[in-house]
Structure formats: C-alpha cells, structure tokens
Amino acid sequence: MLALSTKVLYMLQKKPFLSAIPVLTIAMAMTSVAYGSTLAKTVSAASPTAVTASATSVTAATASVTPSGVPTVVQSTCMACHGLQGVAADGGMFPNLAAQWKPYILRELDHFKAHTRADPQSSIMWGMVAPLTAAQMQQVAEYFSSQKPAAGHVYDPKLVAEGKKLYFGGLPKEHMPACMACHGTTLAGLPPYFPMLAGQKRTYVINQLTYFKSGQRVATHKDIMQYIATRLNQKQITALAAYIRSR
Ligand code: HEC
Ligand code: HEC
C-alpha cells in the first residue's frame, strides 16, 4: 500500500499533467486495499467496543431511530455540530456531511476511531466515535450520505472567481493538477473515496488544506493532498474555499 501511494506521488511529480484517469485508477486500487484492511480491523474490534458502549450509554449502543426516522445518535450527538440534516451552521469550523459519499464518511469515522486522522481539530471527533458500534457507524454514514446537499453561497465574487480558476486550471508552473481531476467538474467528488466538496464550509476547507500542507492531516491519501496543498499559498487556499462554498 505504501509503495503504491509513493508511486502515485512519483507519477504526479514526473508527469504533472498526466491525465486524471491513470492517477485515479491507481488511487482507487490503493484505496480498496486500504479499505479492506480497515474493515477487517473494524470487524475484529467490534465486540469489545460494543461492550464498552453498552456499559457507558444505552442510547449509544443501539442503532435505533427516532419516530421521524433519524438515527437516535444523530439527534442526541452529531446534530449539535453537523446539523440535523448534515448541513452545519455557517461561520463555524464544522463540516457539512449531507450528501457526502458513504464509503468516505465511514472511512473517516474509522480514522477518527483509530486516531489515524489526528489533525488539530480531530480529537473532538475521537470522543464522538469512541462509543459508536460498527452498526451505528454504518447507520449514520447511510443517513448523512442520503441527505440533501448544502446550497451554495457566494460571499465574495472576486475571490470565488480566483478560486474557480485554480480549481479548473491547477498551477501548471508548480506541477499541480487541477482539483477538478479528482473532485469533479460539479465538485461532487467521485465514490468511493474522493470526497464531495460542493458547498463545504469555508473555515473547514481552509483548515483541512492547511493541515494537509503542514502534514498534520495524514490519511490514506496523504501523498495526494499533501502534494497539492504544499503548492498552495494562504491566499490561494482562501480563494479555493470561497469557490467551493459557492457551489
Ligand atoms: C462537538 C462538535 C461535533 C460533534 C457533536 C460531532 N462532530 Fe463530527 N466533526 C467535528 C469537527 C470539528 C470535525 C472536523 C475534524 C477535523 O478537522 O479533523 C468533524 C468531522 C467529521 C467528519 C469528517 C468529515 C469530512 O468531510 O472529512 C465526519 C464524517 C463526522 N465529523 C461525523 C460525525 C458524526 C457521525 C457525529 C455523531 C456521532 C459527529 N460527527 C459529531 C465536530 C463534531
Ligand atoms: C489526484 C486527486 C486529487 C486532486 C487533484 C485533488 N484532490 Fe483533494 N482530495 C483527494 C483525496 C483522495 C482526498 C481524501 C483525502 C484523505 O484520504 O484524507 C481529498 C480531500 C480533499 C479535501 C478534504 C475534504 C474533507 O471533506 O475533509 C479538500 C478540502 C480537498 N481535497 C480540496 C482539494 C482542492 C482545493 C484541490 C485542488 C487545489 C484538490 N483537492 C485536488 C484527491 C485529490
């Protein structure tokens, strides 16, 4: 797995304008391997987690739903920061989860649970996922991924235009491919593991790009987003966040 991800980075450096397809194909192959092993870990870890959860909280241990069909844990916990339907309040650091790809959500929950997603904001989520069972993680991922996506909002048309240019054009001189290659022309991402970006909160996007750049967010695809983010300055990051929020 490590060898493959290094190969992706190498290819991006060697052939900066390599069409998105081979990069995607390799990256996808890389993820299925990684995901398989994460799943295996989750399954083997499932029973001790369930025992702890039932000892600490009755609501958290069951994958129950409210009369309106919302998972109980969403209403009792996740909603406070991510919104009942997965659209977080504006102006905060909490991400939208609505319409995000289910496998991506599940993988991030796994990474929070294992503490392998360890950027400066992640410890908030470590506490949130600790009592969840594998069944509850499936349930919340299914719930959030099937919600209506957040509506776009233009805060600063000039910044949005700058961000759009970068999103679709990349930085040829820096050998940085366009975001579009992996996150798509409609910013919908690509299942399973290329996250949707459309409408995502500005502060969250700025934080994540900054964490990728500093190496503080390390995940399965660290080589890809680290390669990208280290080529961006703060002004470009702000512009990209404005464009992403506008969609
Ligand atoms: C107290 C606030 C808070 C609560 C409650 C909370 N979260 Fe989060 N969540 C965050 C923050 C902050 C982040 C960003 C973490 C980071 O930067 O690593 C986040 C990130 C996430 C992500 C990653 C999103 C992405 O695009 O990568 C997922 C998935 C998630 N939360 C799911 C949940 C679920 C499911 C629950 C309920 C069990 C929940 N959260 C409850 C604050 C919260
Ligand atoms: C070669 C493919 C590729 C390109 C090009 C790319 N990304 Fe990504 N991006 C990914 C992958 C894969 C992830 C998931 C990272 C992980 O494993 O944690 C990601 C994650 C992200 C995230 C975090 C999303 C979340 O919900 O936490 C943001 C923000 C992001 N990318 C923005 C960008 C921007 C802006 C650009 C262009 C400057 C870009 N990406 C270019 C593949 C790519």
Image (spheres, rainbow, N blue to C red):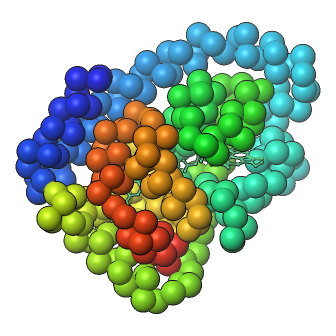
Q: How many numbered badges does the structure rendering display?
A: 0
Residue 192 can be seen in this image: no
Compared with 67, 245 (above or below) is below
| Residue 38 position within the rendered picture, expressed as x and y whole percent measured from the top left | 48, 22
Residue 71 can be seen in this image: yes
Report the residue at 53% width, 15% height from top: 41
* Res. 139 image quadrant: top right
Report the residue at 11% width, 57% height from top: 17
Report the residue at 54% width, 35% height from top: 117
Going by the picture, which residue comes out furthest to the bottom? 157
Report the residue at 41% width, 72% height from top: 235
Quick check: 234 left or right of 83?
A: left
Give the camera-side residue of 155 and 174: 174
Compared with 17, 137 (above or below) is above
Give the camera-side residue of 215 and 150: 215
| Residue 123 position within the rendered picture, expressed as x and y whole percent measured from the top left | 68, 37
Give the camera-side residue of 30 and 204: 204
Quick check: 57 left or right of 40?
A: right
Quadrant for the N terminus, please: top left
Quick check: 197 left or right of 26?
A: right
| Residue 208 position within the rendered picture, expressed as x and y whole percent measured from the top left | 50, 53
* Res. 45 image quadrant: top right
| Residue 59 position within the rendered picture, expressed as x and y whole percent measured from the top left | 89, 32
